[in-house]
Image: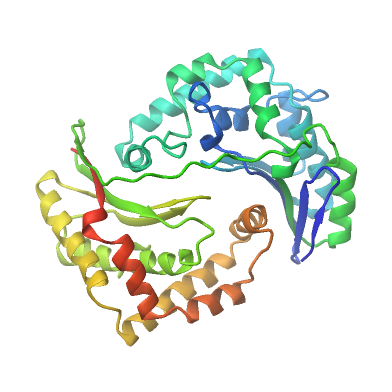
Amino acid sequence: MNIKTLNNRLRVAHLESESEVAYLGVGINVGSSDERPEEYGMSHFIEHMLFKGTKKRSNYQVISRLEDVGGELNAYTTKEETFIYTAIPKKYMSRAMELLADILFNSTFPEAEMEKEKDVVLDEINSYKDNPAEVIFDEFEEQVFEGHPLAHNILGTEETVKSFTQKMVFDFIERNYTTDKMVLFSLGGFSQEKIDNLAEKYFSSDRFAHCSERKRMEVRYQPQKKIVEEDTYQAHSIMGNVAYSMYDKRRLPLHLLCNMLGGPAMNARLNYQLRERNGIGYNIETHYSAYSNSGILYIYWGSDENNVKKSNAIILRELKKLTKEPLTESALKRAKQQYLGQITIANEQKEGRFLNFGKSIMHFNTFKTIEEVKERVNVISAEELHEIAKEVFDPKQQSSLLLV
């Protein structure tokens, strides 16, 4: 794998993969944390509006360009990234490349389409509010990252979304959608040379080529415990702490700890203790999200209101076990074996692998093979995990939020 940098500083990376299906995407190192208070929700709104028409295509022509040949066009926004990507029969790679360039460099953001899309986003916000099992995650991040750009919701608020104007959209793009923040990445049965040539043809625009840099604020964390009364059938609980950034070497060991504690397996420690042994929770999850200068780890579970205290006690007990002493050799071996198996299976899912590839190029300018990841996992020691657990799982540093 080679990375080519165009004159406008946009990077191009390709992974060869023998298949009749090809993937092509553009990652932009811009998300909701780059928004000013009056712009909350702008990154997500622009993601929607990128499909609403360009200087030479109507919105229908944009969405039909790839769908007419069986392809798919998708996008998503995070707190620090925006991704636009396609899955297509590989013979249409040139068509996909031209369309993505047209969307990125020539979108017109028609005012009539903006007004319609505002209603769509407002419906999304209201639908989201109806689901406390989803709302609690964003409310917890607002609590943990209070006062930091990472705190606010990606969707924005009803007030901010309604206030968006065409000028505000163009100003945000001019300030943030610069080609030095963009990565063009692909996976498929092509040579790097072919992808590079297509990129030179369609993505060499210098319209947004000026250098830009995200200002990073320090996260100042203070543990907080909150209870919010909601009209729900069950209690929704979350507990967590700030964690390591995506550039921290302890990130992978922490992922291993999280997987062992509350990963997708039925025998994960918290799932086994709460659901299998005590029957007091249906959904128990542990998540770790790493951002550019911080991270967050949280444990979520839903239970009957009468079981909240018992659930909380069981979780704190399991956290204390991890902080008290290192894992035994057999427990460490089992945890690694399970995690490595999950990585192997996930690597077979091409779309996920493709998106991970793009994100890795964006942030690290490289991509580790599955063999390299496995090598790193295999050398993780029990002592390393113990030191991380003492820091991240310290009961005194846990914040909590209860919707009841």
Can residue 268 be seen at all in this image of the molecule? yes
> Closest to the observer: 344 or 1?
1
The quadrant in which the N terminus is found is: bottom right
- Where residue 109 appears, as percent x and y from the top left, is 69, 21
Quadrant in which residue 264 is drawn: bottom left
Q: Quadrant of residue 367?
A: bottom right
* Above-or-below relation of 173 to 70: above
Residue in front for this viewpoint, 306 or 402: 402
User: Could you say which is closer to the camera, residue 65 or residue 193?
Assistant: 193
Q: Which colour assignment does the render follow?
A: rainbow
> Quarter holding the C terminus?
top left
Q: Is residue 299 visible?
A: no
Task: Say left or right for 191 vs 151.
Answer: right
Q: Residue furthest bottom?
A: 329
Picture residue at 54% right of the left edge, 72% below the top: 344
**Residue 239 position in % (x across, y down):** 27, 51
In the displayed structure image, the side of residue 244 where residue 400 appears, left or right = left
283 vs 391: above or below: above
Q: Residue at x 69, y 43 (%)?
A: 181
Residue 258: quarter of image: bottom left
Check the image and report above or below for 343 versus 66: below
Between residues 180 and 52, which one lies in front from this camera angle? 180
Picture coordinates of residue 278 (x, y %)? 14, 63
Q: How many marks?
A: 0
Q: Residue at x 38, y 41 (%)?
A: 145
Percent position of residue 228, x then y = 20, 34
Say left or right for 391 vs 359: left
